[in-house]
Image (cartoon, rainbow, N blue to C red):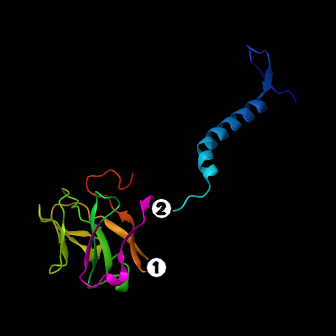
Amino acid sequence: MNEDKLVDPEKGSSFNRRDFLKLGTTTVAGSIMIPLVPALAQGPQPKAKLGGYPVVDVVSLDSVREGTQVPFTYPDKSSPAVLLRLQQSAMGGVGPGNSIIAYSILCTHKGCAVSYRPERKLFICPCHWSSFDPAMAGQMVVGQASHPLPQITLRINAGMIQAVGVDGLIYGRQTNVS
């Protein structure tokens, strides 16, 4: 079998197509692996984040009674949020009767801070009166907002309610985590 030979004019050496493909494949594989070497050398890292989001202890489950509102920040210190325990089950809720939920309190219309009004069972924005239903995944009920409030994903771990993610984009951001 006669393979075509490629000749390097400067060195006068030659190699066949098979050698050329081996060299190319090795070069591509090496360029893919080089960025991974430092991470592989360090070994397994502790999980401080879940899906890119930090895991943050918000409050103990035992201290959250019906009607409780717990302000906190998530996923960072510049993102105000509130945890609520409603009287009824809520979409995405955790805990007894799935009644514990949390939301960013920045209105999706203009970023004003909404507040929960228990007598109306709604989050209401004081700027343009957009209203959001916390039991229905923060869905807008009335107003100028075009998106539901971003819901903070919660979990219960060893009696502690933890924030572990956000469903929806927090007002004024291109991404919730950097």
The quadrant of the rendering that contains the N terminus is top right
Q: Position of residue 51 (x, y in %)?
A: 46, 61
- Residue 69 found in image quarter: bottom left
Q: How many labels were placed on the picture?
A: 2
**Badge 2 local density, few (<14 within 10 Å), some, or many (20+)?**
few
116 over 41 or under it: above or below: below
Instruction: Identify the mark nearer the N-term, 1 or 2.
Output: 2
85 over 178 or under it: above or below: below
Q: Label 2, on which residue?
A: 48
Residue placed at 20% from the left, 61% from the top?
Answer: 145
Q: Position of residue 131 (x, y in %)?
A: 17, 69
Q: Is residue 174 left or right of residue 10?
A: left
Residue placed at 34% from the left, 67% from the top?
Answer: 152
Q: Position of residue 140 (x, y in %)?
A: 22, 68
Which element is circle 2 on?
A: loop
Q: Which mark is residue 75?
A: none
- Residue 23 found in image quarter: top right
Q: Are marks 1 and 2 in contact (CB under 8 Å)?
A: no
- Residue 97 is one of the magenta-drawn residues: no
**Cα–Cα gap, marks 1 and 2:** 17 Å
Q: Which mark is residue 158?
A: 1
Q: Is residue 17 left or right of residue 80?
A: right
Three-letter code for the amino acid on which mark 2 is drawn: Ala
Task: Specify the segment rendered in magenta.
Answer: 49-72
Residue placed at 19% from the left, 62% from the top?
Answer: 113
- Residue 59 is one of the magenta-drawn residues: yes
Which element is circle 1 on?
A: loop
- Residue 3 found in image quarter: top right
Q: Position of residue 177 (x, y in %)?
A: 38, 55
Q: Is residue 153 left or right of residue 108?
A: right
